[in-house]
């Protein structure tokens, strides 16, 4: 049990770090293949936080952002 607690603590810190920065994604659909995004896969751009459906799409976008069009989700 003593070994479990530090690991749990580290996991919580990691999750907090992921969500603390950048704010919500500006898009709902992956700019690479159009699937619904998951916020854990994201890149910070001048336009805001761009999210992706998977790590492969995120890497593709990072390699050449100009190839993809980010469609912002409808405004409220
Ligand atoms: Zn994708």
Image (tube, rainbow, N blue to C red):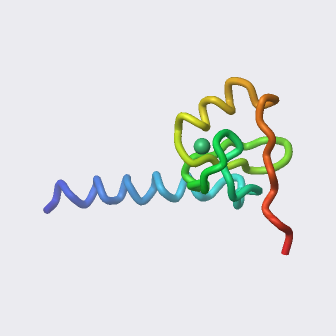
Residue 31 or residue 51, whichever sits in front? 31
Q: Is residue 48 left or right of residue 14?
A: right
Q: Is residue 23 left or right of residue 52?
A: right
Quadrant containing the C terminus in the rendered view: bottom right
Question: Which quadrant does ligand 1 occupy?
Answer: top right
Residue positioned most to the front: 34
Q: Residue 29, located in which quarter of the rendered image?
A: bottom right
Residue positioned most to the bottom: 76
Residue drawn at x 55%, y 51% is 40
Quadrant containing the N terminus in the rendered view: bottom left
Residue drawn at x 82%, y 29% is 66
x, y percentage for residue 60? Answer: 63, 29
x, y percentage for residue 58? Answer: 61, 37
Q: Residue 46, located in which quarter of the rendered image?
A: top right
x, y percentage for residue 50? Answer: 72, 48
Residue drawn at x 68%, y 42% is 43
Q: Is residue 59 left or right of residue 70?
A: left
Residue positioned most to the top: 63
Q: Is residue 40 left or right of residue 4?
A: right
The relative height of residue 67 versus residue 26 in the rendered view (above or below) is: above
Q: How many marks?
A: 0
């Amino acid at each position: 049990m003593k070994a479990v607690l530090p690991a749990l603590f580290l996991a919580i810190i990691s999750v907090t770090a992921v969500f603390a920065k950048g704010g919500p994604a500006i898009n709902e659909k992956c700019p690479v293949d159009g699937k619904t995004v998951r916020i854990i896969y994201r890149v910070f751009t001048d336009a805001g936080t761009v999210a992706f459906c998977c790590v492969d799409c995120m890497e593709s976008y990072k390699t050449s952002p100009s190839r993809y069009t980010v469609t912002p989700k409808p405004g409220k």
